[in-house]
């Protein structure tokens, strides 16, 4: 009996070989394993939130306040997880969130993550502050889908240069993160005296940028770190900067970090192509609304005019069902894949993606739906 159950469960992991079966299966287990491997500095940096970590906690409790009320007897034998975003078909409504400095989790950093994402045709979103350059990441991915996340630089010619490089390297969209005009207040990092940026883990896109380097008196790591710290936070960012970004590229532009419905409307009016409803995984404004709680009014404000994505707190297949039912077209996962990377490199990330896809498929069937794009409020109740 136990053997038979095992076979049925494992049959769902399509790309996982024998060694990988020993790896964790829940995001809680991944987190525990990562905690055992990583020093306190990097671990706290990854898992932590800002301030009193109330928004970090709210990102989870928000999901628990919605329950799925499943439908039965609806012949769900033929199902699809596939969606279309900006004219591209994706196999699943899952993307990997932009996470900077992945070299703090594993020496292969973004290269390992990007390869795992490519194997599942899950878009990888490369961060401005990645440990490997956007060109190196692109090279390891072949034709697999990838987007580039931009931190708006104080020097807008540096931003323009990075956007041009991303376009040349086959990135399919630009994600402008709008919630990090300064860094959130992270008590854990102060206690640990830890800053991965100062340790030089997020330099690659800068030291490979001709415009950025032309601004340095000497091109070395120390000078680059000092210049990045002067460059990366841009509290003056305003709607007026958007026209400049638009002129730099024909790629779709998404804003990441929108929570207020009025900002969502303004974004549509300014020609933004998509939004990521996000509070940065509870790492920026503590006390901010959870992403899931912000979603329904943002969805109403946007009224289907542009795609809506959501991140912050997605941990299970059921979480994805809830986000899609409340108006998201797709979701981004953050910390769970980074824990997979820390514990088992590329295989760890693959396993995290694989289990999430399998959970989503089972949850979709058991909810009584055939397609992720059919999900709506009708299958949820607020507790
Ligand atoms: C260690 C770490 C680094 C991050 N770096 C970036 C980044 O460089 N750019 C960005 O837009 N978001 C960054 N984020 C935020 C993620 O893109 C995402 O919004 C968040 O992790 C989602 O929440 P989750 O971790 O609860 O899934 C980072 C998050 C973490 C945990
Ligand atoms: O740690 C983060 O969440 C993040 O997005 C960030 C922002 C600026 C520099 C480095 C990381």
Image: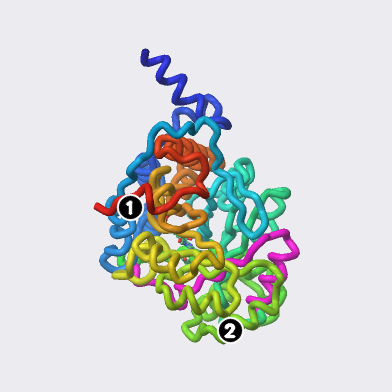
Q: Which residue is mark 2?
A: 241
Span highlighted in magenta in the image: 158-186
Instruction: Classify the position of the N terminus by image quarter.
Output: top left
Q: Which residue is label 1 attached to? A: 63
Q: Residues within 10 Å of mark 1 (few under 14, many from 20)?
A: many
Numbered mark located on residue 49 in the image:
none
How far is mark 2 from mark 1, CA to CA?
Answer: 34 Å
**Residue at 62% of width from left, 67% of height from top?**
174
Question: For residue 346, which quarter of the picture?
Answer: top right
In the structure shown, which secondary structural element does the residue marked by tag 2 occupy? Answer: helix
Q: Position of residue 42 (x, y in %)?
A: 41, 56
Answer whether residue 184 is magenta in the image.
yes
Q: With 109 as the anchor, is 141 left or right in this view? A: right
Residue 337: x and y in percent read 48, 47
Question: Residue 222 at x, y = what percent?
Answer: 56, 72
- Please tell me whether residue 81 is drawn above or below residue 300 in the rendered image: above
């Amino acid at each position: 009996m136990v053997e038979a159950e095992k076979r049925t469960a494992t049959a769902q992991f399509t790309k996982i070989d024998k060694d990988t079966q020993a790896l964790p299966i829940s995001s809680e287990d991944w987190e525990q394993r990562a905690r055992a491997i990583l020093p306190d500095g990097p671990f706290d940096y990854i898992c932590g939130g800002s301030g009193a970590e109330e928004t970090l906690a709210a990102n989870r409790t928000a999901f628990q306040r919605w329950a799925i009320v499943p439908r039965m007897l609806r012949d769900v034998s033929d199902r699809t997880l596939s969606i279309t975003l900006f004219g591209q078909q994706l196999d699943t409504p899952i993307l990997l969130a932009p996470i900077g400095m992945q070299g703090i989790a594993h020496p292969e950093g973004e290269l390992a993550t990007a390869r795992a994402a490519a194997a599942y045709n899950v878009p990888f979103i490369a961060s401005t502050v990645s440990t490997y350059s956007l060109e190196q990441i692109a090279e390891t991915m072949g034709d697999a889908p990838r987007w580039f996340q931009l931190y708006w630089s104080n020097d807008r010619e540096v931003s323009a240069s990075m956007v041009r490089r991303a376009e040349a390297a086959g990135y399919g969209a630009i994600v402008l993160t709008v919630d990090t005009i300064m860094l959130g207040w992270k008590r854990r990092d102060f206690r640990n005296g830890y800053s991965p940026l100062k340790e030089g883990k997020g330099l690659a896109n800068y030291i490979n940028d001709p415009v950025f380097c032309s601004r340095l008196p000497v091109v070395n790591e120390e000078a680059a770190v000092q210049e990045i710290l002067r460059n990366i936070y841009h509290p003056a960012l305003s709607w007026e900067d958007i026209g400049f970004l638009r002129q730099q590229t024909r790629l779709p532009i998404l804003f990441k970090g929108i929570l207020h419905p009025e900002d969502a409307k303004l974004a549509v009016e300014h020609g933004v192509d998509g939004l990521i409803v996000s509070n940065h995984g509870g790492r920026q404004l503590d006390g901010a609304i959870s992403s899931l709680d912000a979603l329904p009014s943002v969805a109403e404000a946007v009224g289907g005019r542009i795609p809506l994505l959501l991140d912050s707190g997605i941990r299970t297949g059921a979480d994805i069902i809830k986000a899609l039912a409340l108006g998201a077209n797709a979701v981004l996962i953050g910390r769970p894949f980074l824990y997979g990377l820390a514990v088992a490199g590329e295989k760890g990330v693959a396993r995290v993606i694989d289990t999430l896809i399998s959970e989503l498929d089972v949850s979709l069937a058991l909810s009584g739906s055939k397609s992720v794009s059919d999900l709506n409020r009708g299958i949820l109740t607020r507790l």
